Image: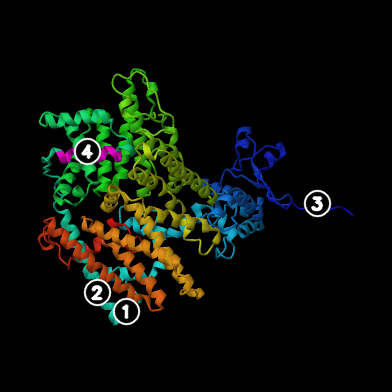
Amino acid sequence: MERQSRRRRRPALSCLECRRRKIKCNRNDPCAHCVSARSQCTYRIYDDEPVIQQRPDRGASQGSAAGLSVHAASSLGEADQTRTDELTTEYGNNLSGSGATAVLGRLNDTPNTPGRDGIQPSNRVLDAEPDVWAFLQRIQKPEESSASDPIHELSETGRSILPSQFGLQGSQILLNKTRTLRYSHCMVTAKEFATIIACFTEASGSSEGTSFQGIETRALIDQIGDLLRKCKNISRSSKVGRPSRHLSNPQFGFASLSRDMADEMASLYLQSFESVYRILHIPTFWAEYRKYWDHPEGVTTKLRLKVLLVIGIGSSLSEQGSSDEGFRRMVRQWVYAAQTWLSGPLEKDRLDIAGLQIHCLTNLARQIFSIGGDLVWMSTGSLVHRAMQIGLHRDPKHYPAMSVLQAELRRRLWATILEMVVQSSLDSAMPPRISLDEFDTEAPSNINDEEVGESTAALRPHPKGAYTATSIQLLLLDSLPTRLRMLHLLSGLRCEFSYRDVLKLSSEITDACRACSSFVKENEGSGVRPFHRNLLDYLVRRFMIPLHCTFAIRARTNPLFYYSLKVSLDVSLALLSPEPDEGFSCLMAGGGWFREGIRYASSIISLELIAQAEAQRLDGTLNRNSQYRDLLKQAVRDILSLSAERIRRGETNVKTHMFMSMVMAQTEAMEADTPCELKVAQSARDSLEFCHGLLQTWAASASLPSPNDTGLTSTSLDAWKEGYGLDLDLDLFSPDAVLY
């Protein structure tokens, strides 16, 4: 009896020619080896199946899709249990210590499966064998529920998960507004916020739902809409007197201020921000500063702008500067003047170190004082281009005639620009406009500013563990490659990343945070202040939330993502509980610089509070253990207090306070087992009444024109709809969407 040939169990992913030559195939269509050898590239998944040949007469789109369909079969090469064991071995120690689930699946790094994103099978597969394509479709078809097959869910790439969160809504929002959505969009669309979103959309007139149609709730909805319109009118009237509204006839004046007050503000800046963002050489700046005060009429525009920006930024750390509305208005004039100078005709005097210093200071001031802070990403791109134009992306060793001081200034300034790039990219959810292979500038030396001057011939850097005026910048620079890689993965249109990539990046960022903490503890008596510790931790740790948030919201349906939920919560609570410091508290109350980070943290905490209350209600344990919910509630109360303080200082965004009040009301209604709609609507009304009172008090102290004087009334429906666009329904924390 003739022996039958045994069917090959695993699919052959390499082409026939590479299998014959026993070499590695890159599985492209055609593969690289067949292209170089000018041979025909053919594939056969099983030995007894027909040959799948490349057909050059097919369209390019069909060929590429076919290559993807064959390549997608690579998921058959590994068993799910093997992937689970490997990932558990690699990350088991870290996850167990954090309370994460013990079982984690190994992610494969293959592209999206065929058909999942609308990719159609090529004719060459269908022509070869219908059963082959049917088999590939069957094995690659995603499960209807992630909970029913968690291993399959974990094996999905991050890029295939993200579109399922945005869906078609993203394109509608992009057409309605000119800005793209941020990373936290997926959190705000979670089902836990359905009642809150329904309340807001009905109050704003964006939808006609059925949840708030009762007599009492309907009356509350009408009151909410009226209060929102009143708050918006005050906000718009506050913008009328800003220089940006009168650029056709700009009158930028440099009002005089006392020398003592200026000295205090300048010292605050140099002791705080300059240690993190190295922009100036401190001895050189003090010499220029004295020159400014000795001969104010004879100084150049560059020097005037540099001095006034330093004073203005330093005022954000002073209680006097933060609470004095007249002084804040003067600082805004300085920032607008600097931005106008930068935006003028590009003369050669802008393209030098002083011009870049003014650009960095202006970007920093815009974020701190919320002067177009959400648009700093665009300005940062221009900053990078200018820096590269004068060669900052090349290390000074390539310029042998350059002095030691100038070389060190260029290295510091380039490192500062890179940090601004990654921070603005994270805030705007836009790609960073630089990559590691586009520059070779080395890190600055670990020295104090007094140790380098015009006459310095050689540097003697301190050991890396010793604290100097450059140490904090060097700590940030150590984690820059990881954060830059993370941003490229999150914002890249064609980048595919797996959950294993997320865990790896998360581990690297955690190591960076621990390295910063260890360094700070070792140098507590060397000049490191709580402000430095808080700001350093914030600038690095906040990258964890956008990295994990997409997976964190899926943790309740797939426990394999529990680690992402825990990390997101831990980071959110840490961002809201900095080490006590007066200057840092003033900076947080100012709002601008921390807007995005606090918004991410608020979204995560709110989502977890509602989800935890709902889970315990369903389990029947709501009244047994409330310690965890009490912790989250206290965090919500802290956010409410912070939001109220920001409004007292001139912030016009009332949404954060309203949203957090609605979250608290929904949670309390669930705990009392009462309908949520009435409580949510009442809390929104009460919050807006409180915020409207704060806005009126601030407007009176700032001598703002009344809404009627600016042509804005409570019945300005066109202006209302313009400010409350479609994106509001989905991104409640974006202040620009409502009141800007």
Instruction: Estimate the spatial distance between the alpha carbons at disc 4 and disc 3, rounded to whole Å.
Output: 84 Å
Residue range corresponding to the magenta coloring: 260-273
N-terminal of the two: label 4 or label 2? 2
Query: Where is residue 565 drawn, in percent x and y?
Result: 48, 58
N-terminal of the two: label 2 or label 1? 1
User: Does the stretch in magenta take in 695?
Assistant: no
Residue picked out by circle 4:
266
Q: What color scheme is it?
A: rainbow
N-terminal of the two: label 4 or label 3? 3
Q: Is residue 207 left or right of residue 238?
A: right
Q: Nearer the viewer, mark 2 or mark 3?
A: 2
Residue 190 appears anywhere in the view:
no
The residue that appears at 27% across and 42% down in the rendered structure is: 363
- For numbered disc 1, what is the local secondary structure? loop
- The reply to whether callout 2 and callout 3 are in contact (CB within 8 Å) is no
Quadrant of the image occupied by residue 434: top left
Q: Nearer the viewer, mark 4 or mark 3?
A: 4
Residue 550 appears anywhere in the view:
yes
- The reply to whether callout 4 and callout 2 are in contact (CB within 8 Å) is no
- Classify 10 Å Cα crowding around label 2: few (below 14), some (14-19), many (20 and above): some
